[in-house]
């Protein structure tokens, strides 16, 4: 088999544990996982569709994924493989690869709650998740199940901030609607040396009025002056303290 380039996604899949019994194995685990993943990205939403799609494109898929058999696998081969592999290992491998691909530009991600239309919990109810989506690169950076209602979304985000920023070093700014405009969450983002843009509505009248007053006389020139001051503070030794915490984001003091 042709050696896999180190920087490609398939090389990450080759590091995953193969959950299959080695007896009777015909196809490389990483190759099968790659076909399933690409099939899903191509809007083949079940294993029968993936199998048909793979047969149509087998001449291209076979060499690309290091597969050696003359014919594409049956749908049960894909389903049995997918039923056993470690989802945590897969997510870690995919995140690691994507993070390397996106180190050249700072990321801005929107945080929002979403209710899944394709997955139910053990009681048959749709699963509600907190989604972190980077619109600039069209990538979902993370999602976590929200089990206690929409009101707990800020607590779920705060609990996962460390792992989110560790997985995505280039993630610099989080945006969110009014439910995330809470002092403990904002402070946690600042302490992680990131920035935020949060919506403030009339449900926080004092904060809303303070911001309106603070920005009443703001101009493009005054905003540019603050950004220059911020940059100069960063260039000085120890200049990443209070000066760094003066962005044009909302909800900061």
Image (cartoon, helix red, strand yellow):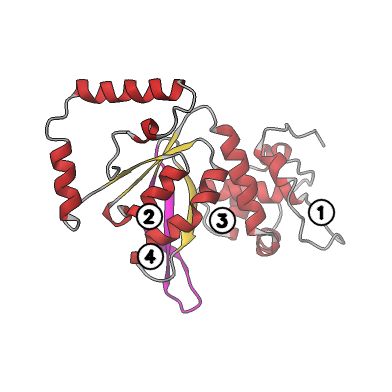
- Give the labeled residue for mark 3: 49
| Contact (Cβ within 8 Å) of mark 4 with mark 2 | no
Query: Is residue 174 left or right of 212 when viewed as pictured?
Result: right
Give 67 or 96, whichever is nearer the viewer.
96
Q: Quadrant of residue 86?
A: bottom right
Residue 145 vertical position relative to residue 65 in the rendered view, above or below: below
- Residue 182 in percent (x, y) is at 32, 55
Q: Nearer the viewer, mark 4 or mark 2?
A: 2
Residue with the mark numbered 4:
152
Residue 241's quadrant in the figure? top left
Determine contact: label 3, label 4, CB under 8 Å. no
**Residue topped by disc 2:** 184
Q: Give the range drawn in magenta.
A: 110-135
Judged from the image, the secondary structure of the residue bearing numbered disc 1 is loop
Q: Which of marks 3 and 4 is nearer the N terminus?
A: 3
Element assignment for label 3: helix
The residue beneath circle 1 is 26
**Residue 55 visible in the displayed image:** no
Q: Distance between the residues labelled 1 and 3?
A: 21 Å
Q: Judge left or right: residue 31 versus residue 218.
A: right
Pick whichever of labels 2 and 3 is earlier in the sequence.
3
Rounded to the nearest angstrom, the CA distance separating label 1 from label 2 is 53 Å
Callout 3 crowding tier (Cα within 10 Å): few <14, some 14–19, many ≥20: some
Cα–Cα span, label 3 and label 4? 37 Å
User: With respect to residue 135, does 127 lie above or below?
Assistant: below
Q: Is mark 4 on a helix, strand or loop?
A: helix
Q: Give the mark, 1 or 2, whose residue is nearer the N terminus.
A: 1
Q: Residue at x 38, y 61 (%)?
A: 153
């Amino acid at each position: 088999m042709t050696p896999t380039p180190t920087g490609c996604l398939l090389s990450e899949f080759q590091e995953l544990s193969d959950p299959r019994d080695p007896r009777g194995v015909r196809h490389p685990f990483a190759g099968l996982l790659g076909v399933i993943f690409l099939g899903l990205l191509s809007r083949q939403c079940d294993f029968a569709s993936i199998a048909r799609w793979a047969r149509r494109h087998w001449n291209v898929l076979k060499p690309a994924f290091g597969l050696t058999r003359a014919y594409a696998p049956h749908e049960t081969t894909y389903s049995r493989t997918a039923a056993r592999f470690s989802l945590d290992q897969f997510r870690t491998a995919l995140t690691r690869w994507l993070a390397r691909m996106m180190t050249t530009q700072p990321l801005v991600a929107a945080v929002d709650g979403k209710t899944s239309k394709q997955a139910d919990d053990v009681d048959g109810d749709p699963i509600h998740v907190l989604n972190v989506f980077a619109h600039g690169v069209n990538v979902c950076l993370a999602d976590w199940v929200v089990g206690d209602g929409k009101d707990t979304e800020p607590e779920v985000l705060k609990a996962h901030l460390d792992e989110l920023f560790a997985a995505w070093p280039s993630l610099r700014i989080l945006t969110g609607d009014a439910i995330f405009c809470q002092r403990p969450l904002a402070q946690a983002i600042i302490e992680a040396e990131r920035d935020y843009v949060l919506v403030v509505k009339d449900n926080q009248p004092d904060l809303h009025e303070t911001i309106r007053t603070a920005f009443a006389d703001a101009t493009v020139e005054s905003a540019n002056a603050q950004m220059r001051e911020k940059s100069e503070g960063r260039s000085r030794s120890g200049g990443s303290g209070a000066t760094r915490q003066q962005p044009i984001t909302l909800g900061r003091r």
